[in-house]
Amino acid sequence: MNENSDVMYRLLVQSVVDYAIYMLKPDGTVANWNAGAQRAKGYLPDEIIGKNFSCFYSDQDQKKGLPQHGLGIARDTGRYESKGWRYRKDGTAFWAHVIIDAIRTDSGELLGFAKITRDCTELREYEEQMREARELAERHSEKMAALSTFLDTIVTNIPSSVIVEDVVTREILLINNKAQQLLGGVQEDFVGKKLSQCMTLEMGEYFMQLSDAAQRKGGMHRSERLLDSRGRDRIINATASIIRGNDATHNYVLLIADDVTDQRAADARIHHMAHHDNLTSLPNRVLFSQRLNDALRADREERKITATLCLDLDNFKNVNDALGHQVGDDLLRTVAVRLRSVLREQDTLARTGGDEFSIVLPGLKQAEEAEIVASRLIETIRPPFNVDGHNLSVGLSIGIAIAERGISTPEHLLRCADMALYEAKRNGRNRFEYFTEQMGELAAKRRMIENDLREAISCRQLKLYYQPITNNQHQHIIGYEALMRWHHPEKGMIMPMDFIPIAEETGLIHSLGAYALHEACREAASWQDGQSVAVNLSPMQFKNSALVSVVEAALKESGLAPHRLEVEITESVLLDNTSVNIDILQKLKALGVRIALDDFGTGYSSLSYLRSFPFDKIKIDKSFINDMKDSREALAIIRAITGMSRSLDIQITAEGVESNEQFERLKEEGCTLFQGYYFGRPQPSEDRLKEF
């Protein structure tokens, strides 16, 4: 190559900007540097000439010896070609296509290497994108094929009946397994045929009407109808909608149908269960409220009267306890039939509780009509019921409330009838009572007392007072009866007769009773003379299975000797659940506690009680003592009680003694213990009398 040619060659190489072209000495140092190399790698000639070309590689590639490896191959074979990441002056990477050619003299001496590098980053990215696109297309193709198979399987086995109809030809294009089962046939019986050609007349007309509606109006159309399907009446719920293709010749009607016969029957059962009593099939409280609300609205518009009756069976609990719940349930069903038989068709009889019923009497012309119905109801329940071979007698108590100006909502009317029912039961049962304003006032007062009583218990406003009990020598106090008093911060002293019944109704009696036992035992334990303390137990406390444990805990915590505690019960304790309550009394007696029968002679079966349980004491009711001066009958009863007690070796306490005359006369009749205002009024423990 002559000098001119050499100059032209250098100029040509230097002018190339798309390729990095430079010479390497045999040891790998850069000998020259063209404009393309400067553009590709960012180095000026002065910055790179004389440095080893390995600076274009990463540290990791340098450690692996990749630069020397490339030169070695070029030295041995004459050429080395590769692709890989190379690095610019600023540290950024680019994908390079590299060619290294060995340059030798004619005699074969190695002068160096010519190195050509091209930045192929964009090309590589394009190739990667093309490769990924190709792989994605292949996967998509496979997925679409699998999806098509999957969709075919889904449509075939979908639990609803699916039919696809061609809009133009009106022929069936697709029908799945469920539709074949519904219509009775195989695919060949339907595909290619019109709806009217392959179904019963009734079923074909049903689907054609749906299809026509979808084509005329667009959107989705739903219908539910009772149809003949393969000789059976079935409820079919179906929808029709248009599936639009690329043009009007490729539109389809999609029909989806379900046999909902069993579902509708289940819905009806659930609806009935939600609105009716499971035992009697009568309306329950929910449906009763709806009927009552409807009656009130209709009667207001027609200027008629609505009455609500609340009913409660008398003596039902005794039947349940004695004969079991099965007999009780059978009795309730029979009662429901009798009650329904005396009502009009438009009247609603509902069971709203265990043995509680409610009635709506709509459209009455006069309020007195409710009274006539109530009398009929009581009379229809009066004859005995024969249930499982048992002749059972129960009574019926009824509360009546009439919708008036002040009683206009269902809830208020029902509350008023319930208050009237409470009054009917309080007045002797087996009767009816009308709601009055006085009942509402009393109920409000009871609610107020209940709320105040709850606060009184938590704020310790209750206190025990003690009334002395003496013997017939009238010289010493041998014991005290603990009596509850309520010191209300605003209303002053409230007596037990005003709050104990409410405590029994609300269940607060259990808290009050436990407090009385613990407080009485605690205070009595501090008395120096060893006097006893008597605490009254409510019949309601015997419904608490923990009563014995409460008494035992009160004795243990106070340290009071058990024989110094006396519990007083009334005859009503033995009227209710006798065997259970006697068992509780026996457990109390086993603790060493003394048991007294209070208000003796005022109950129903006093003599039988004395046989059923060994009482330690009998208390003669003060009503006999008040009347004994003027009533021979009262005096005779006192003599009978004292005579019987001497025979049974039971102590007698005469309560309510208010004069010396009564005291002397009762001593003559054989009474041994005395209590009353004559000996002292109830006082707090710190003010109690010790001597007379």
Image (cartoon, rainbow, N blue to C red):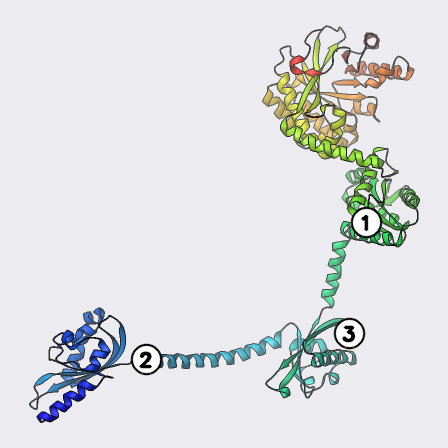
Q: Amino acid at mark 3?
A: Leu
Between circles 1 and 3, the one closer to the viewer is 1
Please state the horizontal and vertical placement of residue 651, each as a whole percent of the image.
Answer: 76, 15
Q: For the residue carrying disc 1, how many other residues have a C-alpha within 10 Å: few (<14), some (14-19), or many (20+)?
A: many
- Quadrant including the N terminus: bottom left
Judge whether residue 543 can be spotted in this image: no
- Compare residues 253 and 36 and report the one nearer the observer: 36
Look at 74% across and 31% down and name the residue there: 502
How far is mark 1 from mark 3, CA to CA? 36 Å
Give the residue pinned by disc 2.
Answer: 122
Please state the horizontal and vertical placement of residue 684, each as a whole percent of the image.
Answer: 67, 16
- The circle on residue 350 is 1
Q: For the residue carrying disc 3, how many other residues have a C-alpha within 10 Å: few (<14), some (14-19), or many (20+)?
A: some
Q: Are marks 2 and 1 in contact (CB under 8 Å)?
A: no
Please state the horizontal and vertical placement of residue 51, each as a whole percent of the image.
Answer: 13, 74
Labels 1 and 3: the sequence-earlier one: 3
Labels 2 and 1: the sequence-earlier one: 2
How far is mark 3 from mark 2, CA to CA? 69 Å
- Compare residues 528 and 288 and report the one nearer the observer: 288
Give the residue pinned by disc 3.
Answer: 227
Q: Amino acid at mark 1?
A: Ala
Where is residue 137, by image quadrant?
A: bottom left
Q: Secondary structure at mark 2?
A: helix
Q: Amino acid at mark 2?
A: Glu
Is residue 368 found left or right of 536 in the rendered image?
right
